[in-house]
Amino acid sequence: MTEPREIRLKRLKMRSMRRGIKEMDILLSRYADARLAQLDSLQLDRYETLLDESDQDLYQWVSGQKPAPEALAALIEDISQTASAG
């Protein structure tokens, strides 16, 4: 059974806010509020894959301390830009 889009968005927003590292809670919650509703299902799949990464890695990628993996680089850049705009 396929998860309805509305439920998926709520689930992804919740996963974005409950990370473990407060900085990532803030950054990903801001991104989720600003962008998730605009993403298509493939983009949501990529975001969900990103949420499976460790907070330490995510923070280093978003902050520019380390380069993001190529498959996630565009998404990480979008998250970084959203964070700096807020």
Image (cartoon, helix red, strand yellow):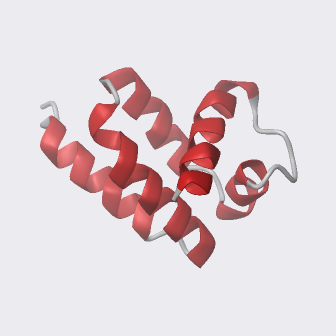
Q: Residue at x 14, y 43 (%)?
A: 6
Left or right: 84 in relation to 29: right
Q: Nearer the viewer, residue 7 or 60?
A: 60
Relative to the observer, which residue lies in front, 79 or 55? 79
Q: In this picture, is 42 found above or below 85?
A: above
Residue at coordinates 34% horizontally, 54% vertically from top-left?
A: 33
Where's the N terminus, which quadrant? top left
68 vs 12, left or right, is right
Residue 21 is at least partly visible in this image: no
**Residue at image location 12% in from the left, 37% down from the top:** 4
Q: Quadrant of residue 3?
A: top left
Q: Is residue 14 visible?
A: yes
Q: Residue at x 64, y 32 (%)?
A: 72
Expressed as whole percent of the image width and height from the top left, the position of residue 45 reads 41, 31
Query: 30 above or below 38?
Result: below
Task: Answer left or right for 65 relative to 60.
Answer: right
How many numbered discs?
0
Quadrant of the rendered image containing residue 39: top left
Closest to the observer, 6 or 84:
84
Where's residue 24, x and y in %? Answer: 58, 66
The spot of residue 18 in percent (x, y) is 43, 71
